[in-house]
Image (spheres, rainbow, N blue to C red):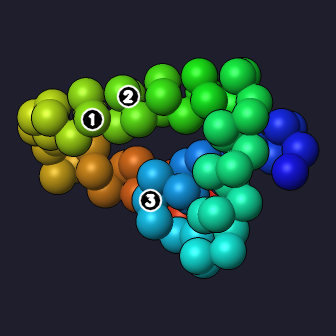
Amino acid sequence: MRCDKSGLIASAHLDRQLGQSDVVNYRAHVETCAGCHTYLAELEQVSLILKGSARPDVSPDMRSYVMSVIAAKG
């Protein structure tokens, strides 16, 4: 595995979107690569913090505006 792809794979790993063989390969890489190990640990911490955070109140107008901008760019 190349470290330049590890960031995207780390996110997919945390979201449980990888197949079993990809999980095994990724975990093996993380165990031998200090940089990717640190990145995954930090990403896990951020994920835990965000899961424990309250969602902000957003007005329906703001939600509609954001969704229209997203749709326009897609």
Type of amino acid at the residue the image marks with label 3: Asp
Give the SS element for disc 2. helix
Left or right of residue 30, residue 12 in this image: left
Residue beneath the point at 27% across and 35% down:
48
x and y, in percent, of residue 61 in the image: 22, 48
Q: Is residue 72 visible?
A: no
Q: Is residue 44 visible?
A: yes
Closest to the observer: 56 or 3? Answer: 3
Label 3 and label 1: CA atoms lie apart by 12 Å
Which residue is identified by label 3?
A: 15
Type of amino acid at the residue the image marks with label 2: Val
* Residue 71 placement: quadrant: bottom right
Residue beneath the point at 69% across and 50% down:
28
Crowding near pointer 3: few (<14 within 10 Å), some, many (20+)? Answer: few
| C-beta proximity under 8 Å, tags 1 and 2 | yes
Residue beneath the point at 55% across and 49% down:
11
Closest to the observer: 5 or 20? Answer: 20
Residue beneath the point at 14% across and 35% down:
52
Label 1 and label 2: CA atoms lie apart by 5 Å
Give the SS element for disc 3. loop
Type of amino acid at the residue the image marks with label 1: Leu
Give the SS element for disc 1. helix
Whether 70 is drawn above or below 10: the answer is below
* Mark seen at residue 48: 1
Position of the C terminus, as image quadrant, is bottom right
Which residue is identified by label 2?
A: 46
Crowding near pointer 2: few (<14 within 10 Å), some, many (20+)? Answer: few
* Residue 44 placement: quadrant: top left
The answer to which of marks 2 and 3 sits earlier in the sequence is 3
